[in-house]
């Protein structure tokens, strides 16, 4: 495959409908999730800075657990996408059956771990002592339905590998709508709302932060059940009739892809935990500004993650079909579209950062600090977008060892070490921590582009060489 620097000006734009046909449902799903995250943060934020800190202090642990489960989905994604590309549907269904076993094992294991460790997590995260009991309750409730959450993540990824991105999208939208409605009813006490001049009494549980956790838990249960039903009804990869007994022929290649990705996600998420713990030690204002800035920024990654899904699935299909030209054309289209969208999203983030932060907090110090770090990171959005797409292509090719190495070097070698020196030794604040985060993103971008240009990740190039 030609290197980025050697690529001809011509780009096969005729493939753009195929790419966006897979990408837009994921983008819409991500948009809905982000919108609900915005609403959650705003609703909890209205309860005060302490409530925001209680929810935000365990966010990175949520990433740690969720990303570890997601890694198993990536292993099945590469295997199933390549099997479907090769026209081997029976092999794809066998892999789908093994994904059910993965859901049962990971769901039950993480339920036990997270619920039993919930009192310890806020302490490990160096959360303010006054916030720890509330943060522990929030975390425990959030992880009671872990089996359903594992089903949503892994079965959703398997469906996307089969080219069905709309079912996870529809399920995700329903989950988010349920979450918003229950937030409205469970967070606030009973009150009277004025609607078009009429006074409307509205029941409310008045549970505050606990109500937000309960709303999320109920919506997770719905999502897990709905995606499982859709998965078992799927015409191509339904696991009906497949055995739950471990199948080494399927599991070995899936785990070969999943294990490095799991280590990558675990290592990166553990890094986020240390990163957040250092930020939490800077006080409530820094914690609140960091939590809100993360929430705002997540919306601007939506194009990247949508295109990452398309890149992974279509790369796997092309490799399974042994279609080298199509693989090269897809790479050019996806990268060009991604850079364009991330340039636009970065410009919007820079321009509207203060207005967006002010939606979630009325604290002037939080707004000023959150706006500053968001404008800093806005300048690195296109670079991060390229990294996401190349990583998606590598996932589709079944190459997860190199992304693991790159992300661990960036996270621990730049972000964690740099933040520790800046905040814990030099007494610097949140701005320095986000500067280290941007340095991490730029280093990973450079490493991905260099490796992509080498072409060693592409098994079709290897076949040609041999």
Image (spheres, grey):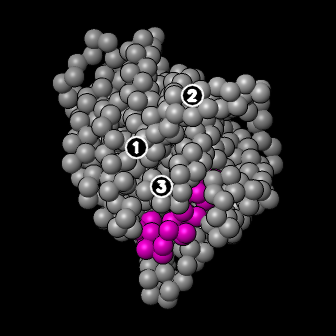
For the stretch drawn in magenta, the main secondary structure is helix
In the rendered image of this protein, does residue 447 appear above or below residue 278? above
Hey, which residue is sitting farthest left in the picture?
245
Residue displayed at 57% across by 34% down: 191
Which numbered marker is on residue 210? 1
- Label 3 vs 1, first from the N-terminus: 3
Q: Secondary structure at mark 2?
A: strand
Q: Which residue is mark 3?
A: 51
Residue drawn at (75%, 56%) of the image:
355
The region drawn magenta spans 276-296
- Provide residue 391's location: percent of width, then percent of height: 53, 50
Q: Is residue 319 left or right of residue 438?
A: left
Expressed as whole percent of the image width and height from the top left, the position of residue 463 reads 48, 42
Judging depth in this view, the residue of 203 and 24 nearest the camera is 203
Extreme residue toward the bottom, this view: 426
Local crowd at mark 1 within 10 Å, few (<14), some, or many (≥20)?
many
Say which mark, if any, is on residue 202.
2
């Amino acid at each position: 495959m030609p290197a980025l620097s050697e690529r001809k000006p011509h780009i096969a734009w005729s493939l753009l409908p195929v790419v966006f046909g897979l990408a837009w449902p994921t983008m819409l799903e991500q948009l809905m999730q982000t919108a609900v995250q915005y609403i959650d943060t705003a609703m909890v934020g209205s309860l005060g800075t302490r409530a925001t800190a209680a929810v935000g202090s365990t966010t990175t642990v949520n990433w740690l657990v969720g990303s570890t489960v997601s890694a198993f989905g990536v292993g099945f994604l590469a295997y199933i996408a390549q099997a479907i590309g090769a026209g081997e549907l029976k092999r794809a269904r066998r892999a789908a059956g093994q994904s059910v076993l993965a859901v049962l094992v990971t769901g039950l294991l993480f339920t036990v771990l997270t619920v039993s460790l919930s009192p310890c997590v806020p302490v490990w995260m160096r959360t303010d002592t006054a916030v720890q009991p509330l943060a522990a309750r929030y975390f425990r409730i959030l992880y009671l339905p872990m089996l359903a959450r594992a089903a949503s993540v892994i079965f959703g990824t398997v469906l996307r590998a089969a080219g069905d991105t709309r079912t996870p999208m529809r399920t995700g939208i329903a989950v988010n709508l349920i979450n918003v409605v229950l937030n409205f009813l469970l967070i606030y006490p009973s009150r009277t709302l004025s609607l078009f001049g009429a006074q409307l009494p509205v029941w409310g549980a008045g549970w505050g932060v606990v109500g937000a956790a309960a709303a999320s838990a109920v919506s997770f249960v719905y999502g897990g059940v709905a995606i499982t039903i859709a998965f078992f009804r799927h015409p191509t990869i339904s696991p009906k009739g497949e055995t739950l007994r471990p199948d080494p022929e399927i599991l070995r290649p899936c785990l070969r892809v999943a294990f490095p990705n799991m280590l990558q996600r675990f290592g990166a998420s553990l890094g986020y935990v240390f990163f957040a713990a250092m930020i939490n030690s800077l006080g409530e204002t820094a914690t609140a500004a960091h939590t809100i800035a993360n929430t705002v920024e997540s919306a601007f990654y939506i194009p990247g993650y949508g295109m990452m899904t398309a890149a992974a699935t279509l790369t796997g299909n092309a490799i399974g079909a042994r279609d080298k030209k199509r693989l090269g054309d897809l790479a050019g289209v996806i990268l060009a579209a991604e850079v364009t969208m991330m340039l636009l999203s970065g410009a919007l983030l820079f321009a509207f950062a203060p207005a967006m932060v002010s939606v979630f907090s009325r604290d002037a110090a939080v707004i000023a600090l959150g706006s500053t770090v968001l404008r800093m990171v806005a300048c690195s959005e296109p670079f991060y977008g390229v990294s996401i797409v190349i990583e998606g292509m590598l996932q589709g090719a079944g190459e997860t060892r190199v992304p693991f190495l790159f992300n661990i070097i960036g996270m621990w070698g730049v972000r964690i070490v740099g933040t520790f020196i800046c905040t814990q030794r030099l007494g610097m604040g949140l701005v320095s921590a986000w500067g280290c985060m941007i340095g991490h993103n730029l280093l990973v971008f450079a490493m991905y582009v260099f490796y992509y240009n080498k072409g060693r990740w592409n098994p079709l190039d290897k076949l040609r060489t041999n």
